[in-house]
Image: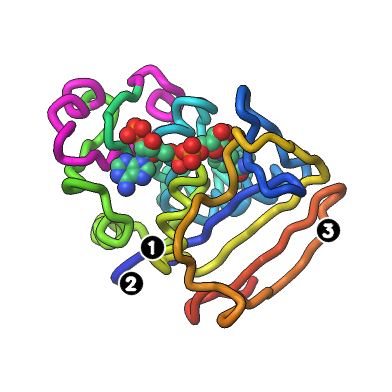
């Protein structure tokens, strides 16, 4: 078992680098790519998203394909991976689909100042973990490994991407570019400001490019642990 999970960050962006619109959820995938993402989900032990994405998108984060669910069950796993979120304010609704769907465990890493509120609100539907004064992604990753997570999929949003990338915790980036523009600086971007380990002096390694209908998948190897397909 590794000391932190193999971490795969999966994201769809518009041509101009946005991951959503300012007002509503924006679907940037197509059916074939959605099925590809489903296969990636099925290959992971846990999926992590930020609390803002839980609130805005209300995602279920389940493996959709019955064949993949059966294949996981045959390996003695829950049909879908564990779900993980992170929050500072603990303003999450226990009735959100994140919590009410799927058999696997749900984990909420909450910053210490609001841990009591988080346990009161979510203790019935999730395991609430005290993440420290400010939840730090390296510590979270180590804790997930200790809970048996060997392969982690990070599925957004931008705040979470930024922290995993700037902390150099991502082994593989799967970036899908959809053929649309958003053109609104109030909309969320793939990442926020930060110091990223990859820059003009240290370029990331492009491992593969694949056209999937009208979108393109770019796979980047961001660490020496990168696992080629
Ligand atoms: N295109 C895609 O592939 C994709 C995927 C996912 C999401 N999205 C879009 O992304 C947007 C949301 O992105 P976002 O950047 O605004 O939010 P986000 O990354 O989903 O969540 C941010 C929230 O997570 C919590 N959080 C993050 N880091 C934390 C830390 N270190 N300690 C404690 N809490 C922490 C905070 O929650 P509290 O506010 O509860 O304290 C923070 O407000 C939505 O529009 C969604 O549709 C797109």
Spatial CA distance of label 2 from label 3 is: 33 Å
Residue at figure coordinates x 17%, y 43% from the top left: 130
Mark 2 neighbour density, 10 Å: few (under 14) some (14–19) many (20 or more): few
Query: Mark 2 highlights which residue?
Result: 2
Element on which disc 3 rests: strand
Residue at figure coordinates x 65%, y 31% from the top left: 21
Mark 1 CB near ligand 1 (8 Å cut): no
- In the image, residue 32 above or below residue 128: below
Element on which disc 1 rests: loop
Q: Nearer the viewer, mark 2 or mark 3?
A: 3
Q: Nearer the viewer, mark 1 or mark 3?
A: 3
Q: Name the outermost residue toward the top.
A: 95
Spatial CA distance of label 1 from label 3 is: 29 Å
Mark 3 neighbour density, 10 Å: few (under 14) some (14–19) many (20 or more): few
Query: Mark 1 highlights which residue?
Result: 150
Q: In which quarter of the image is the N terminus?
A: bottom left
Mark 3 CB near ligand 1 (8 Å cut): no
Query: Mark 3 highlights which residue?
Result: 211
Residue 4 image point, x, y percent:
33, 66
Q: Earlier in the sequence, mark 2 or mark 3?
A: 2
Q: Name the outermost residue toward the right.
A: 213
| Residue 38 on the magenta span | no
């Amino acid at each position: 078992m590794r000391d932190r999970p193999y971490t795969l960050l999966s994201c769809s962006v518009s041509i101009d680098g946005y991951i959503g619109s300012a007002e509503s959820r924006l679907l940037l995938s197509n059916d074939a790519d959605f099925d590809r993402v489903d296969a990636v989900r099925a290959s992971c032990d846990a999926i992590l998203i930020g609390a803002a994405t839980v609130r805005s998108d209300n995602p279920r984060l389940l493996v959709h394909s019955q064949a993949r669910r059966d294949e996981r069950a045959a390996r003695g796993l829950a049909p879908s991976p564990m779900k993980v979120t992170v929050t500072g304010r603990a303003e999450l609704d226990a009735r959100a689909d994140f919590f009410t769907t799927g058999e696997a465990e749900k984990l909420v890493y909450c910053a210490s100042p609001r841990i009591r509120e988080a346990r009161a609100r979510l203790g019935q539907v999730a395991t609430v973990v005290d993440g420290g004064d400010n939840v730090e992604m390296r510590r979270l990753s180590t804790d997930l490994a200790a809970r048996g997570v060997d392969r982690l999929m990070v599925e957004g949003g931008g705040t979470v991407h930024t922290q995993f990338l700037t902390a150099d915790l991502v082994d593989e980036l799967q970036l899908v570019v959809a053929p649309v523009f958003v053109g609104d600086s109030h909309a969320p971007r793939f990442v926020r400001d930060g110091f990223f380990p990859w820059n003009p002096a240290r370029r990331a390694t492009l491992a593969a490019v694949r056209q999937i209908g009208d979108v393109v998948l770019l796979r980047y190897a961001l660490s020496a642990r990168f696992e080629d397909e």
